[in-house]
Image (cartoon, rainbow, N blue to C red):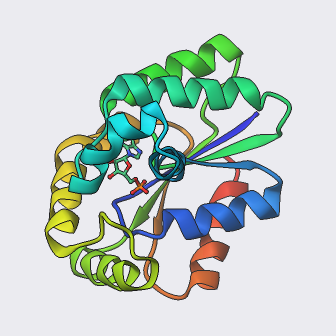
């Protein structure tokens, strides 16, 4: 089983690239942000629970995310691979993901860190706010999301950097150029 973790701050381009990767390799794109946004827009009990955290740029509880991820993996066992976009976002989520994968007899094949500097991130997130009207892309919420990233998600780099599948890719440039670098990192020998 191919398990690719696409890692990076909000605005790094994980979503755009994850869609392209999933299409090229026939893997399932799992965006926990998209899953949660769908729950919010359908006003499901889960959606109502997570709405205020999402709209203020806070992380949703590990427990909920771990349940969501486990159910997605279990429902799609026949698929040749997964691109995880936006999960794991805390050390606890990463540890639980490792346990889940172990139970399934799988493991992470690649962790790719998509690197973009902070000024560029803010610029991109503000453009996206205009284009997509995402409620969590206002200037104040963007700042909050970046704070959450630095506090909870960035420490994951230390958790993963010694993994044999860990790679860095520069996420600045045109979409196709970045995509080529990602494919090279995916296909490189371990
Ligand atoms: P994203 O589209 O990945 O930027 O996610 C949008 C929002 O969904 C985040 O700001 C969080 O509120 C929530 N979210 C998505 N994935 C996670 C996760 N793995 N852990 C906690 N919260 C998450």
In the rendered image, residue 28, in percent from the top left (x then y), is placed at 73, 47
Residue 24: quadrant of the picture: bottom right
What residue sits 66% from the left and 64% below the top?
A: 19
Q: Nearer the viewer, residue 50 or 95?
A: 50
Look at the image and tell me whether residue 28 can be seen: yes
Whether residue 8 sits left or right of residue 31 in the image: it is left
In the image, farthest residue toward the front: 43
Whether residue 149 sits left or right of residue 44 in the image: it is left
Residue 137: quadrant of the picture: bottom left
Q: Nearer the viewer, residue 141 or 96?
A: 141
Specify the quadrant that holds the C terminus. Answer: top right
Residue 106: quadrant of the picture: top right
What residue sits 33% from the left and 46% below the top?
A: 51
Look at the image and tell me whether residue 183 can be seen: no
In the rendered image, residue 45, in percent from the top left (x then y), is placed at 44, 31
Q: Nearer the viewer, residue 182 or 129?
A: 129
Task: From this view, report whether residue 103 is shown above or below residue 155.
Answer: above
Task: From this view, report whether residue 122 is shown above or below residue 86.
Answer: below
């Amino acid at each position: 089983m191919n398990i690719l973790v696409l890692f990076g701050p909000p605005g790094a381009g994980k979503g755009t690239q994850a869609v392209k990767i999933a299409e090229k390799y026939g893997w399932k794109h799992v965006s926990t942000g998209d899953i949660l946004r769908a729950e919010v827009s359908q006003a499901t009990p889960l959606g109502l629970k997570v709405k205020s955290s999402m709209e203020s740029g806070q992380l949703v509880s590990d427990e909920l995310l771990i349940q969501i991820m486990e159910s997605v993996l279990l429902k799609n066992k026949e698929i040749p691979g997964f691109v995880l976009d936006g999960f794991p976002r805390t050390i606890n989520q990463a540890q639980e993901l490792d346990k889940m994968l172990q139970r399934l007899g799988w493991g992470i094949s690649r962790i790719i860190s998509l690197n973009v500097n902070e000024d560029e991130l803010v610029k991109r997130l503000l453009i996206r706010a205009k284009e997509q009207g995402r409620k969590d892309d206002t200037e104040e919420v963007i700042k909050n999301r970046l704070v959450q990233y630095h506090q909870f998600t960035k420490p994951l780099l230390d958790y993963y950097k010694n993994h044999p599948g860990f790679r860095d890719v520069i996420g600045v440039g045109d979409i196709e150029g970045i995509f080529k670098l990602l494919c090279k990192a995916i296909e490189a020998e371990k």
